[in-house]
Amino acid sequence: MHFIHALPLTILVTMSSSGIANTCDTGHLQSPINITTTHKQKLPNLVFDYKSSSLVLANDGHTLRIRINSRSQLKVGKQIYTLSQIHFHTPAGDQVAGEVFPMGAHFLHKSTSGQLLVLVVLFRQGEPNKTFNTLLSNIPKRVGPNQDIPNTSIDIQTLMPTEKSYFRYMGSLTAFPCTEGVEWIILREPITVSIEQLSTYKNTFSDNARAPQSINQRPILESI
Ligand SMILES: [Zn+2]
């Protein structure tokens, strides 16, 4: 996730030099991670009720953000999470068995009780993604707030794999204040983006992924 990238570097430097420990440095449940050893088990199916959404985009200077105004929900067991926004990282941040994915999408959800859940879609280089083309051709030229893209909607499911098996772990925001207790679900099957699409995206946005963090004693669950 992405809150920190807007903070000027000087503020970060001031904070760390003040001697006040912050969770980004001292936390033990930080994201992203390199997923290696997993506990395979029966996990709840992910039940998606994502609606088509009229396209609202923002260029925050560090990522392209899709604002979701439709009532799109993800159900995991009995818990219901509402999707609020999707944004992109290059590279993905989370790795699987050391594989670095050139791009990842973070689908940011919140439950009514305030529990945050990040669902991650990993991208490998390959065939172009049609919906990503729609996004690329509408990147706001100026850094700023949300912009309505007229007469354009997207089907969110086209930014996800068909197969919905997943990894699950307890993590954090990936940027300051690196708050922990965020649920992470990483869809195991990557989808593809073409080298041309990546290159177009990178014409506007620099790499913005946090390095993988220590797993410590966290169990990484894998659905079977
Ligand atoms: Zn993110």
Image: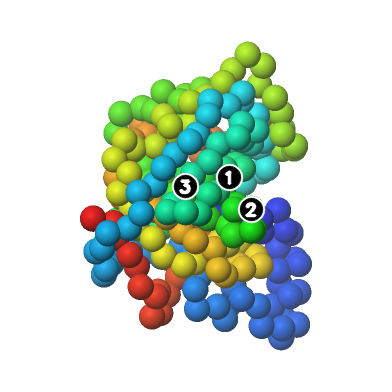
Kindly identify the residue that appears in the image at 53 percent across and 25 percent down.
52
Residue type, mark 3 in image: Lys
CA–CA distance in space, label 3 to label 1:
9 Å
Q: Nearer the viewer, residue 194 or 52?
A: 52
Kindly identify the residue that appears in the image at 68 percent across and 42 percent down.
60
Mark found first going from the N terminus, 1 or 2 = 1
The answer to whether 145 is drawn above or below residue 207 in the figure is above
CA–CA distance in space, label 1 to label 2:
8 Å
CA–CA distance in space, label 3 to label 2:
12 Å
Q: Which mark is residue 64?
A: none
Q: Nearer the viewer, residue 48 or 55?
A: 48
User: Helix or strand or loop: what does disc 3 sit on?
Assistant: strand
Q: Say whether residue 72 is visible.
A: yes
Q: Which mark is residue 82?
A: 1
Q: Nearer the viewer, residue 51 or 196?
A: 51
Q: Nearer the viewer, mark 3 or mark 1?
A: 3
Residue type, mark 2 in image: Thr
Q: Residues within 10 Å of mark 1 (few under 14, many from 20)?
A: many
Are the residues at dot 1 and dot 2 in contact (C-beta closer than 8 Å)? yes
Determine the image quadrant of residue 169.
bottom left
Are the residues at dot 3 and dot 2 in contact (C-beta closer than 8 Å)? no
141 left or right, relative to 157: right
The answer to whether 89 is drawn above or below residue 142 in the figure is below
Q: Residues within 10 Å of mark 3 (few under 14, many from 20)?
A: some
Q: Give x and y (percent) for residue 26.
A: 57, 81
Q: Which mark is residue 112?
A: 2
Q: Nearer the viewer, mark 1 or mark 2?
A: 2
Q: Which mark is residue 75?
A: 3
Kindly identify the residue that appears in the image at 48 percent across and 26 percent down.
155
Q: Give x and y (percent) for residue 127.
A: 30, 29
